[in-house]
Amino acid sequence: MDGLVWIKQEENQKKQFIPDIFFTKLRIFNEEYNIHHFIKGGENKQYIELKYTQNSFAISFIAMDFVNGENSTYSYKLENFNNVWMNTRTNEAQFTNIDPGDYVLLVKYNGSEEDSDENRIQRIHIQILPPWYMTLYAKLIYLLLILASIYWVYLFGKNKYEQKKIKITEQLNQKYEKEMYERKLRFFTNITHELSTPLTLIHGPSERILNYKGSDSFIKKYAQIIKSNTERLNTLIQEIIDFRRMETGNKICHIQEVDVSKIVSEITESYVELAEQNNINFGSEINPYLKWNTDYGCFTKILNHLISNAFN
């Protein structure tokens, strides 16, 4: 071969061979696996997916340098965990108790010149999955539970407020009704006291007519009717007063032995004239020696009501 060959020895010495780096093995808790079994994704972005229980692991790598391989070192760092380059003479990067998240493992081959800027960097993405209770779906469930709890507390508070409001309204209504009832009762009580005076004025003259020796039987008959009815009205007035006393707790029953036969005879006698005026056949039959332990006033009122309702 004819010709001339010129070699620049300086440039040839400066040019450095930079081998490719390959990831080979994955070790999890002293169990070695082929790293390719854990690699996922497409060609543009490949990554290793690990469970949260596999957060202590080691990744092996190798540079295809058959000349200076024995004297070479590696540097690596795990982005998002530790941004400091770690030097090692072994071809393995070890990590312990890595939190769930996304990381990038960067490895560079130092060759015989560790500080060279021309060193090629190989990288691989690592994803450590969170536990099921920290996944996105779990967090959504937690959020829904929190919102549901807040809504439940709101409904509970609203319901309690409504119940309290209803209770207060009922108490106010009861208080108002009681006050109105008390006013009406006081009104009727005052009226009954006012009626007592004219009835007493009527009752007095009727007694004088009955006791007057010059009164004939006809006058005495109707004077007796006037007297009986005034006494009856007084009894009704007394009932209202007694009812008021019972409402205020001041009414006391006096239980004693009463002559039932005598009381019935006196009350039925006062209704004889009313029966004659209305052409009603009215009479009474009772044991003449009947006695009973009861309140005299209450018994008289009950008997008067029964006979009066019968006439009505």
Image: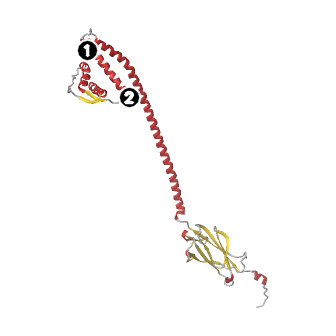
Provide the secondary structure element on which disc 1 rests.
helix
- Direction from residue 253 to residue 280 in the image, left or right: left
- Depth check: 205 or 275 in front? 205
* Amino acid at circle 1: Lys
The residue carrying pointer 2 sits among few (fewer than 14), some (14 to 19) or many (20 or more) residues within 10 Å by Cα, namely: few
Residue 120 in the image, given as x and y percentages of width and height: 68, 76
Residue neighbourhood size for the residue with mark 1, other residues' Cα within 10 Å, grouped as few (<14), some (14–19), many (≥20):
some
The quarter of the rendered structure image containing the N terminus is: bottom right
The label number, if any, that marks residue 221 in the structure image:
1
Q: Nearer the viewer, residue 214 or 156?
A: 214
- Residue, disc 2: 245
Mark 2 or 1: in front is 2
Please state the horizontal and vertical placement of residue 109, each as a whole percent of the image: 68, 77
Query: Does label 2 or label 1 sit earlier along the sequence?
Result: 1
Amino acid type, callout 2: Arg
Q: Name the residue located 65 percent from the left edge and 69 percent from the top edge.
A: 82
Q: Is residue 85 above or below residue 232?
A: below
Q: Which residue appears farthest toward the bottom when viewing the image?
A: 1
Q: Position of residue 80 (x, y in %)?
A: 64, 67
Where disc 2 sits, the SS reads helix
Spatial CA span between label 2 and label 1: 36 Å
Give the number of marks.
Answer: 2
| 182 or 279, nearer to the observer | 182
